[in-house]
């Protein structure tokens, strides 16, 4: 199946309140353009250099989502254009994004990444750390960023109950902070469960573009 067919199949199955981010990491410009040409505007990338290169070459009305782990010292490279940063996992990073957004005279939307998976390897905050960041954000002057929601990744498991439980945990955090309206969870393997559990932004790579040949 082509990118266009894969994309249309997913889109036709989505409720209207769910935003689809097409995860194009490691994929060439031609495939991104295939998706763009059938109306896809939101794309997700994980690596700063790859994102900068693609942003320079590809149409300027693409909404670029940074979904990888962002090191503070690299925020400056994406601050001029990034549409949404999904992986905020420290106050230090948040302050750095604020500083770089100010330099670019922008307000950058951000999501806090919560650690919900059982694997240790995945980045993210626990509920207490996220709480602390929210309190600081609400009390301090960080005028050039806006925390609009949460991002999370469930465990890489076939156990649907466990995935559901992890998504519920993420969703429950919103009870304390209802202003967190964007909920970015669900990937190729678990997006249907994610939508059932309240996701309104899914990040899909391989189901649209095919398996990735290499992991950077
Ligand atoms: C790669 C990646 C995705 C997409 O994964 P697929 O399984 O290919 O859909 C989604 N979110 C993040 C954070 C990723 O790194």
Image: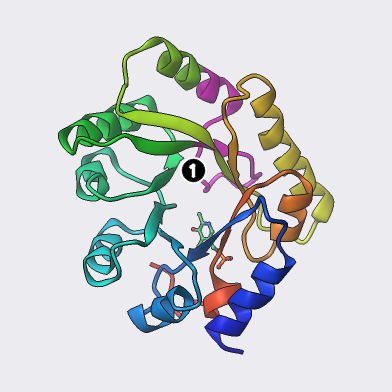
Residue sitting at x 40%, y 44%? 85
For this view, does 69 lie left or right of residue 6? left
Q: Work out whether residue 151 or residue 58 is closer to the camera in this orientation and state it.
A: 58
Q: How many marks?
A: 1
Is residue 183 positioned above or below 10 on the image?
Answer: above
**Pointer 1: residues within 10 angstroms few (<14), some, or many (20+)?**
some
x then y, percent, for residue 101: 24, 35
Assess whether residue 125 is covered by the magenta stretch.
yes
x then y, percent, for residue 100: 21, 35
Q: Work out whether residue 2 or residue 74 is closer to the camera in this orientation and state it.
A: 2
Q: Quadrant of residue 2?
A: bottom right
Residue range of the region highlighted in magenta in the rendering: 112-131
Q: Quadrant of residue 94?
A: top left
x then y, percent, for residue 47: 33, 59
For this view, does 192 lie left or right of residue 147? right
For this view, does 160 lie left or right of residue 57? right
For this view, does 154 lie left or right of residue 203? right
Residue sitting at x 63%, y 40%? 116
At mark 1, the secondary structure is loop
Residue furthest to the right in view is 161
The residue where tag 1 is placed is 123
Q: Quadrant of the C terminus?
A: bottom left
Assess whether residue 178 is covered by the magenta stretch.
no
Is residue 143 positioned above or below 89 on the image?
Answer: above
Residue sitting at x 68%, y 55%? 16
């Amino acid at each position: 199946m082509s990118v266009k067919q894969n994309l249309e199949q997913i889109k036709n199955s989505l409720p209207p309140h769910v935003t689809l981010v097409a995860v194009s990491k490691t994929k060439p410009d031609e495939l991104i353009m295939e998706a763009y040409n059938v109306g896809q505007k939101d794309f997700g990338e994980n690596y700063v250099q790859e994102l900068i290169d693609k942003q320079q070459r590809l149409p300027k009305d693409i909404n670029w989502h940074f979904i990888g782990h962002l090191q503070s010292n690299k925020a400056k490279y994406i601050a001029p254009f990034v549409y949404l940063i999904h992986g905020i996992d420290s106050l230090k990073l948040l302050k750095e994004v604020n500083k770089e957004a100010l330099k670019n005279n922008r307000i950058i939307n951000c999501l806090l990444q919560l650690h919900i998976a059982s694997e240790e390897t995945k980045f993210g905050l626990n509920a207490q750390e996220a709480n602390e960041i929210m309190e600081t954000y609400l009390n301090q002057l960080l005028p050039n960023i806006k925390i609009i929601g949460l991002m999370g990744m469930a465990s890489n498991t076939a156990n649907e109950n466990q995935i559901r439980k992890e998504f519920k945990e993420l969703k429950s955090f919103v009870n304390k902070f209802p202003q967190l309206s964007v909920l970015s969870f669900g990937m190729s393997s678990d997006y249907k469960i994610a939508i059932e559990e309240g996701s309104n932004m899914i990040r899909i790579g391989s189901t649209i573009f095919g398996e990735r040949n290499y992991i950077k």
